[in-house]
Amino acid sequence: MGRWQPNARGRLEQAALELYVERGFAQTTVTAIAGRAGLTERTFFRHFADKREVLFSGAAELQEVLVAAVAGAPQAAAPIDAVAAALDAVGAVMLDRPRSRRRQSVVAANPELMERELAKLAALSAAMAGALRERGVPEPAASLAAEAGVAVFRISFERWLDGPDGSELAPLMRESMAELKAVTAGT
Amino acid sequence: MGRWQPNARGRLEQAALELYVERGFAQTTVTAIAGRAGLTERTFFRHFADKREVLFSGAAELQEVLVAAVAGAPQAAAPIDAVAAALDAVGAVMLDRPRSRRRQSVVAANPELMERELAKLAALSAAMAGALRERGVPEPAASLAAEAGVAVFRISFERWLDGPDGSELAPLMRESMAELKAVTAGT
């Protein structure tokens, strides 16, 4: 067998999440994660800066999906509709609810991880605002539309995690977006 | 002179901010802060848990102001109007722009402080959502209205700090709220 490890990244993510749930985040070492995945620590550090980043590797993908969808929305689309299209795109990739739930239980149990989570969400909002400005949306409309989108995402994501098995994120986000529109309209 | 120190808290805040700006946050010790304020370390720790919390002592006051204003809004007010009333109340207490600007320059220079700032904003949003639920606003409308309010606050606050001397926060928040309403209406 060569040095190439099939799906090393995915195996490390899986092993880390298992151990964080079993033992707690603070009690889990990189050595233990690599061992559980049948890989070396060196391989771990080729993929992740530290054991915290394993939990946030999805944020980069999420950002790409959001930015691409905002950029790809029809030129005539209003800013909030470009944001809604971006949330639809996110809903199409976030499908593994049991895994998201396990991950969230680890993050919610640790204030330091919660703060990192909020920083990642703020970065998503900033990236989306940038993509809206690229479309010619001025400030503060671009940042407000992006913040509205992230608020809808956050609140829908929590409802999704708390909801019944088999429910999907995308319809919840559409519902929350409609609710936000009603709320800001003062109804 | 007795052991009671007039305005010890305010003097410690002032001294800390001066030192953070002069030397950087990481390079400033509690000993130095207490020394600059002419007080003891013991007095420092009677008022603040650590040197980070000095920068966030305003968050508790802000939360009280927001929650009281939401609770005190006319019973017939729509949720978003109760939130707008809360932002007006905040605008009436946040008047010292030079100080806010110095504080923000310290926070922005330090990722750990930025993460703490985001956590405080998330706590403000949660507190405001709670005050809305107390008024009988159901979820997710309560959380969405609160998140919209915090987004308006954040974006207006940044604009205020970047803006010309003598400008006020309250009118910027009213403008941003109007802009958010327009954005979510799809215009």
Image (cartoon, coloured by chain):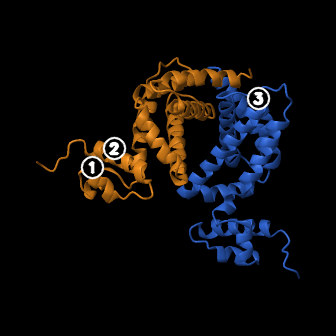
Chain colours: A orange, B blue
Q: In 3D space, how far apart are the residues under numbered discs 3 and 1 (Cα atoms)?
A: 50 Å
Q: Name the kind of residue labelled 3 in the image.
A: Gly
Q: Name the kind of residue labelled 2 in the image.
A: Gln
Q: Name the kind of residue labelled 1 in the image.
A: Ala
Locate residue B91: give its quadrant. top right
Q: Is residue B35 left or right of residue B76?
A: left
Q: Chain of mark 3?
A: B
Q: Secondary structure at mark 1?
A: helix
User: Mark 3 sits on what residue?
Assistant: B136
For label 1, the crowd category at 10 Å Cα-Cα, with few meaning under 14, some 14 to 19 and many 20 or more, is: some
Whether residue B168 is visible = no
Residue at left offset 71%, top offset 52%: B59
Q: Secondary structure at mark 3?
A: loop
Judged from this view, the residue extending furthest toward the right is B1
The x, y position of residue A15, in whole percent, is 33, 47
Q: In 3D space, how far apart are the residues under numbered discs 3 and 2 (Cα atoms)?
A: 42 Å
User: Mark 2 sits on what residue?
Assistant: A14
Q: Chain of mark 2?
A: A
**Which residue occupies the foreground of this view, A140 or A28?**
A28
